Amino acid sequence: MDKKLVCPCGLTCCDCLFYKSEIYETAHKLKQLIKDHELDKFLNIFSKNWRAMGDLLDMSEDQLSDAIGKKFEVFNQMPVFMNVLDSIVKLQCKTTCQEVSGCSIGGNTHQCKALNCIKSKNYDGCWQCSDFENCDNLRFLKNGYGYVIEDNLKTIKEKGFEAVKSRGNKYYAWQRKNNGRVNELSS
Ligand code: SF4
Ligand code: SF4
């Protein structure tokens, strides 16, 4: 793997959900299309006024409710949906820890305890440290990512960055919980 994509703590940016540009670009495009066409306003208004269709369609109140109302009532939540869409767009991390020294989520770059520790020791990463198997600074990451952190650090130490592999959508411990590694989250 390219060194740029390997964080000093052993995370891999290419697998990080904040780095999946396609998700954020698609969310941005969807938001823009909805706004350009004012679909959000239209659906919100329609969700509250679908009964007016009764004059147009020759249906009973119950038929109208089944055919139109139940499908459109959910759109009274369009303002919430647009807000969520906007918040998703803003989450994107457009860079990597190697490039800017920290994780950049939601427009801010955060330096974690591990990164501060690595810097204080003048290391490039935890793979240079004899404590990485028992380090408290990595505990939060090990809870979230399971064996991946230690595995990556060992791989880098023994074989270099090139040997680190992407885990695809089996990166986080919770993504693997149906894959024989159920206990990782609590370990
Ligand atoms: S630097 Fe960005 S992409 Fe890399 S792990 Fe942190 S948040 Fe994810
Ligand atoms: S003590 Fe070692 S393993 Fe822990 S964060 Fe610092 S450099 Fe990394």
Image (cartoon, rainbow, N blue to C red):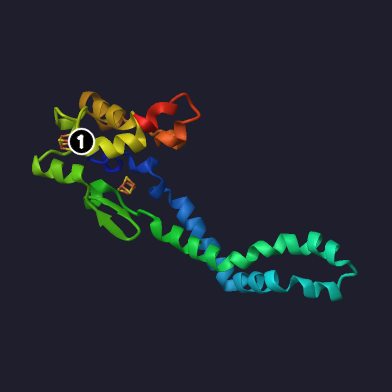
* In the depicted structure, whether residue 92 falls above or below residue 174: below
Q: Quadrant of residue 57?
A: bottom right
Identify whether 14 is placed above or below 111: above
Residue 152 placement (x, y as % from top left)? 29, 30
Task: Tell me which residue sits at (12%, 44%) in the image.
Answer: 119
Residue 169 horizontal/vertical position (percent):
46, 37
Q: Is residue 26 above or below residue 13?
A: below
Toward which corner of the image does residue 41 lie, by quadrant? bottom right
User: Which residue in the structure is indicated by mark 1?
Assistant: 136
Q: Ligand 2 near label 1 (Cβ, under 8 Å)?
A: yes
Q: Secondary structure at mark 1?
A: helix
Q: Relative to the observer, which residue lies in front, 104 or 4?
A: 104
**Residue, x 37% and y 31% (percent of image)?**
186
Res 46 seen here: yes
Spot occupied by residue 45 in the image (x, y as percentages of width and height): 66, 74
**Looking at the picture, which amino acid does disc 1 mark?**
Asp
Q: On the rendered image, what quadrant is the C terminus found in?
A: top left
